[in-house]
Amino acid sequence: EVKLVESGGGLVQPGRSLKLSCAASGFSFNDYWMGWVRQAPGKGLEWIGEINQDSSAINYTPSLKDKFTISRDNAQNTLYLQMSKLGSEDTAIYYCARVSWPPFDYWGQGVMVTVSS
Amino acid sequence: DIQLTQSPSTLPASLGKRVTISCRASQSISNSLNWYQQKPDGTVKRLIYSTSTLESGVPSRFSGSGSGTDYSLSISSLESEDFAMYYCLQYATYPWTFGGGTKLELK
Protein backbone atom coordinates (compact mmCIF):
# COMPACT_ATOMS: atom_id res chain seq x y z
CA GLU A 1 0.00 0.00 0.00
CA VAL A 2 1.36 3.41 -0.99
CA LYS A 3 1.67 5.63 2.04
CA LEU A 4 2.85 9.24 2.31
CA VAL A 5 3.10 10.84 5.73
CA GLU A 6 3.96 14.51 6.14
CA SER A 7 5.43 15.95 9.31
CA GLY A 8 7.17 19.04 10.62
CA GLY A 9 4.29 21.48 10.49
CA GLY A 10 3.14 23.80 13.25
CA LEU A 11 3.17 27.43 14.31
CA VAL A 12 6.06 29.55 13.05
CA GLN A 13 6.75 33.26 13.33
CA PRO A 14 6.81 35.50 10.27
CA GLY A 15 10.20 35.68 8.62
CA ARG A 16 11.34 32.34 10.03
CA SER A 17 12.06 29.08 8.26
CA LEU A 18 10.54 25.63 8.51
CA LYS A 19 11.35 22.26 6.97
CA LEU A 20 8.65 19.73 6.20
CA SER A 21 9.23 16.03 5.67
CA CYS A 22 7.27 13.38 3.81
CA ALA A 23 7.97 9.75 4.63
CA ALA A 24 7.13 7.37 1.79
CA SER A 25 6.45 3.65 1.95
CA GLY A 26 4.78 0.92 -0.05
CA PHE A 27 6.57 1.66 -3.33
CA SER A 28 10.05 2.07 -4.72
CA PHE A 29 10.63 5.71 -3.75
CA ASN A 30 13.69 6.22 -5.92
CA ASP A 31 11.73 5.29 -9.07
CA TYR A 32 9.40 8.27 -8.87
CA TRP A 33 9.34 12.01 -9.15
CA MET A 34 7.75 13.53 -6.04
CA GLY A 35 6.00 16.84 -5.47
CA TRP A 36 4.38 19.28 -3.06
CA VAL A 37 0.98 20.99 -3.19
CA ARG A 38 -0.51 23.40 -0.69
CA GLN A 39 -3.95 24.69 0.24
CA ALA A 40 -4.53 27.92 2.11
CA PRO A 41 -7.52 27.97 4.49
CA GLY A 42 -10.75 28.01 2.51
CA LYS A 43 -8.86 28.17 -0.78
CA GLY A 44 -8.04 25.83 -3.64
CA LEU A 45 -4.99 23.71 -4.36
CA GLU A 46 -1.68 25.26 -5.44
CA TRP A 47 1.17 23.33 -7.05
CA ILE A 48 4.48 24.13 -5.36
CA GLY A 49 6.93 21.99 -7.30
CA GLU A 50 8.47 18.61 -7.95
CA ILE A 51 11.78 16.78 -7.92
CA ASN A 52 13.02 13.93 -10.08
CA GLN A 53 14.41 10.63 -8.95
CA ASP A 54 18.05 11.63 -8.49
CA SER A 55 17.44 15.30 -7.60
CA SER A 56 18.99 16.46 -10.88
CA ALA A 57 15.80 18.21 -11.97
CA ILE A 58 13.57 20.35 -9.78
CA ASN A 59 10.66 22.46 -10.99
CA TYR A 60 8.90 25.18 -8.98
CA THR A 61 5.96 27.44 -9.44
CA PRO A 62 7.62 30.80 -10.20
CA SER A 63 6.14 32.74 -7.28
CA LEU A 64 7.70 30.34 -4.73
CA LYS A 65 11.01 29.57 -6.39
CA ASP A 66 13.07 31.92 -4.24
CA LYS A 67 11.46 30.90 -0.94
CA PHE A 68 11.02 27.14 -1.12
CA THR A 69 13.51 24.35 -1.76
CA ILE A 70 12.54 20.77 -2.52
CA SER A 71 14.97 17.96 -1.79
CA ARG A 72 14.93 14.23 -1.14
CA ASP A 73 16.87 11.47 0.56
CA ASN A 74 16.37 8.21 -1.32
CA ALA A 75 18.18 6.20 1.37
CA GLN A 76 15.58 7.38 3.88
CA ASN A 77 12.62 7.33 1.45
CA THR A 78 11.91 10.90 2.45
CA LEU A 79 10.93 14.06 0.59
CA TYR A 80 11.58 17.51 2.04
CA LEU A 81 10.30 21.04 1.65
CA GLN A 82 12.49 23.78 3.08
CA MET A 83 10.52 27.00 3.46
CA SER A 84 12.17 30.34 4.23
CA LYS A 85 11.08 33.93 4.87
CA LEU A 86 7.63 32.72 5.75
CA GLY A 87 4.70 35.11 5.72
CA SER A 88 1.03 34.88 6.59
CA GLU A 89 0.31 34.00 2.96
CA ASP A 90 2.18 30.73 3.50
CA THR A 91 -0.32 29.54 6.10
CA ALA A 92 -1.73 26.40 4.53
CA ILE A 93 -2.01 22.65 4.57
CA TYR A 94 0.97 21.17 2.76
CA TYR A 95 0.59 17.91 0.87
CA CYS A 96 3.23 15.70 -0.64
CA ALA A 97 2.23 13.60 -3.62
CA ARG A 98 3.75 11.02 -5.90
CA VAL A 99 4.34 12.11 -9.47
CA SER A 100 3.47 8.97 -11.35
CA TRP A 101 2.86 10.01 -14.92
CA PRO A 102 0.25 11.48 -15.23
CA PRO A 103 1.11 13.27 -12.03
CA PHE A 104 -0.12 13.09 -8.48
CA ASP A 105 -1.67 9.66 -8.20
CA TYR A 106 -1.18 9.34 -4.42
CA TRP A 107 -1.33 12.08 -1.79
CA GLY A 108 -0.43 12.31 1.85
CA GLN A 109 -2.91 13.44 4.47
CA GLY A 110 -1.33 16.88 4.66
CA VAL A 111 0.35 18.88 7.42
CA MET A 112 -0.72 22.29 8.69
CA VAL A 113 1.65 25.24 8.76
CA THR A 114 0.51 28.40 10.51
CA VAL A 115 2.58 31.56 10.17
CA SER A 116 1.74 33.99 12.94
CA SER A 117 3.39 36.03 15.66
CA ASP B 1 0.48 30.40 -16.73
CA ILE B 2 -2.52 28.38 -17.89
CA GLN B 3 -5.66 29.33 -16.00
CA LEU B 4 -8.29 26.70 -15.28
CA THR B 5 -11.82 27.94 -14.67
CA GLN B 6 -14.13 25.48 -12.98
CA SER B 7 -17.89 25.86 -12.99
CA PRO B 8 -20.04 25.93 -11.12
CA SER B 9 -18.21 26.80 -7.90
CA THR B 10 -21.03 25.23 -5.92
CA LEU B 11 -23.36 22.53 -7.19
CA PRO B 12 -26.40 21.56 -5.09
CA ALA B 13 -27.74 18.17 -6.14
CA SER B 14 -29.86 15.29 -4.92
CA LEU B 15 -29.00 11.65 -4.42
CA GLY B 16 -29.34 9.68 -7.65
CA LYS B 17 -29.03 12.76 -9.85
CA ARG B 18 -26.55 13.11 -12.72
CA VAL B 19 -24.19 16.07 -12.46
CA THR B 20 -21.46 17.59 -14.62
CA ILE B 21 -18.58 19.84 -13.58
CA SER B 22 -16.79 21.93 -16.17
CA CYS B 23 -13.11 22.89 -16.37
CA ARG B 24 -12.08 25.40 -19.02
CA ALA B 25 -8.43 26.13 -19.78
CA SER B 26 -7.07 29.47 -20.98
CA GLN B 27 -5.28 27.64 -23.81
CA SER B 28 -5.25 24.15 -25.24
CA ILE B 29 -3.92 21.53 -22.82
CA SER B 30 -4.06 18.53 -25.16
CA ASN B 31 -5.96 16.23 -22.79
CA SER B 32 -3.36 16.71 -20.03
CA LEU B 33 -5.98 16.96 -17.32
CA ASN B 34 -6.73 15.10 -14.12
CA TRP B 35 -9.69 15.25 -11.75
CA TYR B 36 -9.40 14.99 -7.96
CA GLN B 37 -11.84 14.58 -5.12
CA GLN B 38 -11.16 16.16 -1.74
CA LYS B 39 -13.15 15.08 1.27
CA PRO B 40 -13.90 17.34 4.29
CA ASP B 41 -11.11 15.66 6.28
CA GLY B 42 -8.64 16.82 3.62
CA THR B 43 -8.08 13.47 1.95
CA VAL B 44 -7.31 13.91 -1.75
CA LYS B 45 -7.91 11.18 -4.29
CA ARG B 46 -7.28 11.08 -8.02
CA LEU B 47 -10.41 10.03 -9.88
CA ILE B 48 -9.53 10.46 -13.53
CA TYR B 49 -6.29 11.08 -15.42
CA SER B 50 -5.52 12.07 -19.00
CA THR B 51 -9.02 13.51 -19.38
CA SER B 52 -10.97 10.27 -19.41
CA THR B 53 -9.10 7.32 -17.85
CA LEU B 54 -10.73 6.13 -14.66
CA GLU B 55 -8.39 5.48 -11.78
CA SER B 56 -8.37 1.88 -10.59
CA GLY B 57 -11.00 1.32 -7.91
CA VAL B 58 -13.00 4.45 -8.74
CA PRO B 59 -16.68 3.66 -9.36
CA SER B 60 -17.82 3.62 -12.98
CA ARG B 61 -20.43 6.30 -12.28
CA PHE B 62 -17.53 8.78 -12.64
CA SER B 63 -16.47 9.74 -16.15
CA GLY B 64 -14.38 12.41 -17.80
CA SER B 65 -14.37 13.90 -21.26
CA GLY B 66 -13.14 16.85 -23.25
CA SER B 67 -10.52 18.16 -25.59
CA GLY B 68 -8.66 21.33 -26.42
CA THR B 69 -9.67 23.84 -23.75
CA ASP B 70 -12.95 22.33 -22.49
CA TYR B 71 -13.18 19.38 -20.11
CA SER B 72 -15.80 17.93 -17.83
CA LEU B 73 -16.32 15.46 -15.02
CA SER B 74 -19.67 13.69 -14.79
CA ILE B 75 -21.19 11.58 -12.06
CA SER B 76 -24.04 9.50 -13.39
CA SER B 77 -26.00 8.80 -10.20
CA LEU B 78 -24.93 10.59 -7.03
CA GLU B 79 -24.29 8.61 -3.91
CA SER B 80 -23.83 10.03 -0.44
CA GLU B 81 -20.03 9.62 -0.47
CA ASP B 82 -19.74 11.75 -3.63
CA PHE B 83 -20.54 15.01 -1.85
CA ALA B 84 -17.11 16.65 -1.66
CA MET B 85 -14.85 19.16 -3.39
CA TYR B 86 -13.63 18.47 -6.91
CA TYR B 87 -10.58 19.96 -8.63
CA CYS B 88 -9.11 19.73 -12.09
CA LEU B 89 -5.35 19.88 -12.70
CA GLN B 90 -3.53 20.65 -15.95
CA TYR B 91 -0.05 19.25 -16.49
CA ALA B 92 0.42 20.28 -20.12
CA THR B 93 2.66 23.22 -19.27
CA TYR B 94 4.67 24.33 -16.25
CA PRO B 95 3.67 25.62 -13.82
CA TRP B 96 0.99 23.03 -13.36
CA THR B 97 -2.24 24.65 -12.24
CA PHE B 98 -5.45 23.61 -10.53
CA GLY B 99 -8.96 24.82 -11.10
CA GLY B 100 -10.61 26.79 -8.34
CA GLY B 101 -12.71 23.85 -7.22
CA THR B 102 -16.37 22.83 -7.23
CA LYS B 103 -18.21 22.03 -4.04
CA LEU B 104 -20.78 19.32 -4.66
CA GLU B 105 -23.34 19.61 -1.89
CA LEU B 106 -26.53 17.85 -0.95
CA LYS B 107 -29.62 19.74 -1.96
Image (cartoon, grey):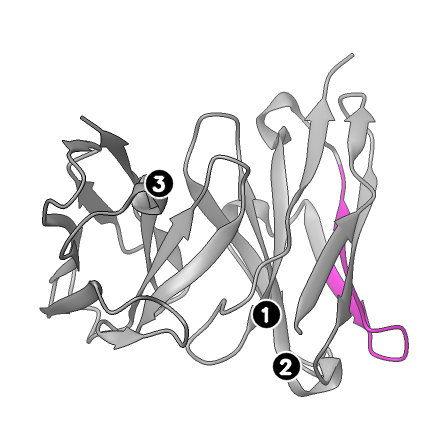
Q: Rounded to the nearest whole Å, what is the CA distance between mark 2 and mark 1?
A: 7 Å
Q: In this rendering, which labeled residue sits more in front, label 3 or label 2?
A: 3
Q: Is residue A115 above or below residue B9?
A: above
B34 and B1: which is toward the camera: B34
Amino acid under disc 2? Tyr
Chain of the residue where label 2 is placed in the rendered structure: A
SS under mark 2: loop
Residue beneath the point at 11% across and 68% down: B66
Question: Does label 1 lie on the same chain as label 2?
Answer: yes
Q: Quadrant of the N terminus of chain A?
A: bottom right
Q: In this rendering, which labeled residue sits more in front, label 1 or label 3?
A: 3
Chain of the residue where label 1 is placed in the rendered structure: A
SS under mark 1: strand
Q: Rounded to the nearest whole Å, what is the CA distance between mark 1 and mark 3?
A: 20 Å
Whether the residues at callouts 2 and 1 have beta carbons within 8 Å, the answer is yes
Q: Is residue A47 left or right of residue A66?
A: left
Q: Quadrant of residue B1?
A: bottom left
Amino acid under disc 1? Arg
The local crowd at label 2, few if under 14, some if 14 to 19, many if 20 or more residues have their Cα within 10 Å, is: some
A67 and B5: which is toward the camera: B5
> Which of the marked residues, 2 or 1, is nearer the chain's N terminus?
2
- Residue beneath label 1, please? A98
Amino acid under disc 3? Met
Q: Rounded to the nearest whole Å, what is the CA distance between mark 3 and mark 2?
A: 27 Å
Q: Which residues are magenta?
A: A70-84
Q: Which mark is residue B85?
A: 3
Q: Is residue A73 magenta?
A: yes
